Image (tube, coloured by chain):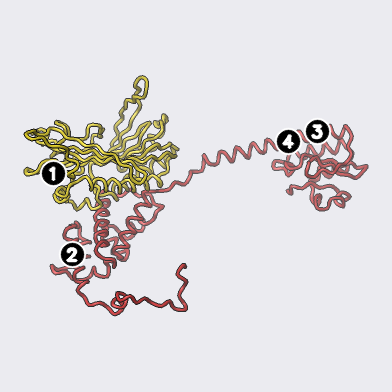
């Protein structure tokens, strides 16, 4: 989770983390792939070539996409003509995650792409898998729980809030319960990484038609400058701090007690 | 060569500061009959790659008048010249201009190609972050390097490499996990006590052993180490305060000695 002491949490709800840079279209990215692959191969030896469909105004166009993944499939880098991202389903703490992200940024810095970075994003998806005696809503701060109707059983309740905080935009999406059949947030595109324990538990609940929920904190920073690894890493450190703050505000005391 | 043009002995007297050194061909061009002198000058110039005449457009002296003509606005002497001289000087000027342009082209090409061939130094932000993380651990624990290396389960040499921000090192997965655990424990200690752990790390624990033994173990159990921290804190707070501590708590501060540096240094 977002707290620096996640590694000591008894039952961490964190299922997925993404750090991402949105860049101005960089159509010659393919030329840089061999060098990037060589620099990152020690940690990310698996490679998947893919295509993404870009729908931008007129007819959709296909753009190449590369996914480099760790041998254990717990971390993956995805990059294409419009974005560079690190995905993780295994999270020790923010220091470890930012070090991994810094290694990716270094690899792109050494490739000397000179890409223009439009925005930076940091997203944490925490899954609520309630114990027998609790409902998903019990894990959310009371003001995020939505209304209740006498005699009605909620089959989906989502809340979306957006904050401007210290120059960053943070979207907080929470669901308790999640719409039926959904594990990860609806607009979330995950890489095919190994699923953590909490995600497997959530999938089991969905199969058994038991309610689950999620807390999705997505921090966005409008960078608008040429790629600068050090500056970007500093921005991500700040974004992590803000995201952690929002998550802590969204989780109920009961949730914190159970998870930590 | 100097970027000054010089003439013969007579003309040195006219412009001693300007004409103290010379190219032989130009002296000849100045002191001999017009055409041959100009030709000699031109012939000599054609072999000069980094000519000082890139500043001076050309020169001519009239042997009759003993004047030097320097076709350069900054050094124009106003000497009288006839049409033939001007024509010859025009050719000389054109050739020098061409030579200068070629020289500039070569130099510009070299200068422009240099950044492409010399790798641009890149910051290794991951290394800097790694060094910062270890420094924070060290600030909290205050262990000697050999002990810190043992805690991180690496060799002392490896620790020095980790602490070198210019080293682009890929950490093993086990090292990453160990570093994360030790970092969290350092933070946990810092939250409890401002004194580095090293001062208390060798004290025996109730259950036997020391907290250092726990930190050096093959597997660090965070809950056990955190409990040991609590025990150490209790024992430290239970100890009688030193005289210095009591005075500090009472608000006494050290007077700066005469040898003390000013506070802003």
Residue B188 position within the rendered picture, expressed as x and y whole percent measured from the top left: 24, 59
What is the CA distance from the residue labelled 3 to the residue labelled 2?
93 Å
Q: Is residue A16 visible to the viewer in this orientation of the structure?
A: no
Question: Are discs 2 and 1 less than 8 Å apart at CB?
Answer: no
Per the image, the residue denoted by label 3 is: B90
Question: Are discs 2 and 4 less than 8 Å apart at CB?
Answer: no
Residue B106 position within the rendered picture, expressed as x and y whole percent measured from the top left: 63, 37
Q: Earlier in the sequence, mark 3 or mark 2?
A: 3
What is the CA distance from the residue labelled 4 to the residue labelled 3?
10 Å
In the image, the chain rendered in yellow is A
Per the image, the residue denoted by label 2 is: B228
- Residue A4 is left or right of residue B95, and the answer is left
Which chain does the numbered disc 4 sit on?
Answer: B
The residue mark sitting in front, 1 or 4, is 1
Residue B213 position within the rendered picture, expressed as x and y whole percent measured from the top left: 20, 64
Task: Identify whether B230 is placed above or below B109.
Answer: below
Which chain does the numbered disc 3 sit on?
Answer: B
- Residue B34 is left or right of residue A40, and the answer is right
In the image, the chain rendered in red is B
Q: Residues within 10 Å of mark 3 (few under 14, many from 20)?
A: some
Per the image, the residue denoted by label 4 is: B97
> Dot 3 lies on which element?
helix
Q: Residues within 10 Å of mark 4 (few under 14, many from 20)?
A: some
What residue is drawn where x is 23% and y is 53%? A5
Per the image, the residue denoted by label 1 is: A138
* Number of numbered callouts drawn: 4
């Amino acid at each position: 989770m977002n707290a620096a002491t996640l590694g000591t949490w008894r039952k961490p709800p964190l299922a997925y983390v993404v750090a991402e840079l949105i860049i101005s279209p960089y159509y010659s990215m393919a030329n840089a792939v061999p060098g990037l692959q060589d620099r990152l191969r020690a940690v990310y030896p698996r490679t998947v070539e893919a295509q993404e469909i870009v729908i931008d105004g007129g007819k959709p166009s296909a753009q190449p996409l590369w996914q480099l993944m760790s041998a254990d499939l717990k971390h993956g880098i995805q990059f294409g003509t419009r974005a560079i991202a690190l995905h993780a389903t295994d999270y020790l703490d923010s220091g470890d995650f930012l070090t991994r992200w810094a290694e990716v940024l270094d690899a792109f810095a050494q490739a000397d792409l000179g890409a223009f970075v439009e925005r930076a994003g940091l997203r944490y998806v925490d899954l609520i898998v309630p114990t027998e005696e609790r409902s998903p809503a019990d894990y959310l701060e009371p003001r995020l729980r939505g209304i209740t109707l006498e005699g009605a059983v909620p089959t989906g309740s989502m809340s979306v809030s957006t904050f401007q905080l210290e120059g960053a935009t943070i979207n907080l999406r929470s669901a308790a319960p999640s719409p039926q059949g959904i594990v990860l947030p609806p607009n979330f595109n995950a890489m095919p990484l190994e699923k953590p324990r909490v995600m497997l538990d959530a999938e089991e609940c969905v199969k058994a038609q038991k309610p689950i929920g999620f807390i999705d904190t997505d921090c966005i920073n409008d960078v608008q400058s040429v790629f600068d690894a050090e500056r970007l890493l500093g921005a991500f450190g700040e974004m992590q701090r803000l995201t952690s703050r929002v998550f802590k505000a969204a989780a109920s005391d009961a949730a914190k007690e159970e998870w930590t | 060569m100097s970027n000054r043009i010089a003439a013969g002995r007579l003309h040195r007297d006219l412009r001693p500061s300007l004409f103290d050194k010379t190219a032989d061909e130009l002296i000849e061009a100045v002191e001999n009959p017009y055409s041959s002198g100009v030709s000699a000058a031109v012939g000599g110039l054609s072999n000069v790659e980094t000519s000082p005449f890139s500043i001076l457009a050309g020169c001519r002296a009239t042997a009759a008048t003993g004047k030097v003509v320097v076709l350069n606005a900054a050094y124009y002497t106003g000497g009288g010249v006839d049409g033939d001289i001007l024509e010859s000087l025009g050719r000389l000027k054109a050739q020098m201009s061409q030579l200068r342009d070629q020289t500039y082209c070569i130099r510009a090409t070299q200068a422009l190609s240099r950044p492409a061939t010399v790798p641009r130094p890149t910051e290794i932000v991951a290394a800097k972050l790694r060094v910062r993380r270890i420094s924070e651990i060290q600030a909290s624990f205050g262990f000697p390097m050999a002990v810190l290396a043992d805690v991180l389960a690496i060799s002392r040499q490896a620790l020095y490499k980790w602490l070198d921000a210019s080293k682009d090192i890929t950490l093993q997965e086990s090292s990453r996990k160990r570093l994360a655990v030790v970092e969290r424990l350092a933070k946990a200690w810092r939250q409890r006590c401002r004194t580095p752990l090293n001062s208390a790390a060798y004290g025996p624990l109730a259950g036997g052993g020391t907290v250092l033994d726990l930190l050096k173990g093959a597997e660090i159990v965070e809950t056990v180490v955190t409990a040991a921290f609590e025990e150490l804190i209790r024992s430290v707070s239970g100890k009688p305060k030193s005289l210095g501590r009591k005075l500090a708590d009472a608000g006494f501060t050290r007077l700066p000695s005469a040898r003390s540096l000013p506070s802003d240094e």
